[in-house]
Amino acid sequence: MLIKENLLIQKFKEQKKNYPPILIYGPNEGLVRENFLKIKEIFNQNNAEEISFSGKLISEQPELLIDEIQTVSMFNQQKIITIEQPTDKNIDLFENAFAELPDQTLIIVIANNLTKNSKLRKFFESSSKYFSCANYEDDFRSNSQQIQNLEKSINKNLNRDIKSYLGQNLSSDRMISKNEIDKIILLYSENDQIPELEHIKLIFNDNADLGLNKI
């Protein structure tokens, strides 16, 4: 089942006991990681056990994934199994392993950008029981949302010049943008200082050549 990125968290929150395996992929590595962490935070209510595999490892030793899915933890009620960089060779294994998942077991598959012809992508999208979510590069709209969230985080309004500057200079990768926004939050969140464009420019990544004294 194909889930739009802006609806992924909402759809996941609607799940209660039997959680669908989720494929999160795309060129926006930062956004992929952000959604991955959000889903883990929502699911992990009781200190879930976490296990991670690579697609290459389970191709060579498929029994590792099967055993982990079937094994009941003695100390944790919930289990999160992460599979990073899967390959099309994993599809037969996924088909068997995902057929009957235990309650409170969540499988998250993380991949880079997948083409429309990807067998892995088709496998998740064609199933009504699994989630597939593409995470594309941030655009003006998504950057505008990040700017709004920034204002809430520092509890201050940004003027038009600052918003325009951030809108033009925030990266298309969420991870890079988050690093820049976190610096702005650090600068303004614990004081009454009014945000100024020149201050923000000083700490932004395109001013790395500024001398230490000027900063």
Image (cartoon, rainbow, N blue to C red):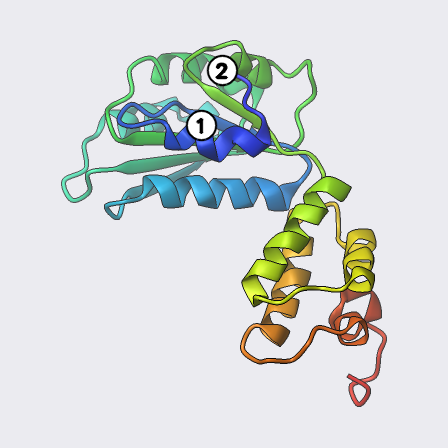
Task: Answer left or right for 209 relative to 129.
Answer: right
Q: Which residue is mark 1?
A: 11
Task: Answer left or right for 40 relative to 210.
Answer: left
Q: Nearer the viewer, residue 178 or 67?
A: 178
Quick check: 192 above or below 213?
Answer: above
Q: Position of residue 76 (x, y in %)?
A: 19, 42
Q: Position of residue 163 (x, y in %)?
A: 77, 58
Q: Which residue is mark 2?
A: 91
Q: Position of residue 79 (x, y in %)?
A: 28, 37
Q: Amino acid at mark 2?
A: Ile
Quick check: 36 above or below 2?
Answer: below
Give me the residue at 64% from left, 53% from top: 148
Q: Nearer the viewer, residue 76 or 19?
A: 19
Element under label 1? helix
Give me the residue at 24% from left, 25% from top: 103
Q: Amino acid at mark 1?
A: Lys
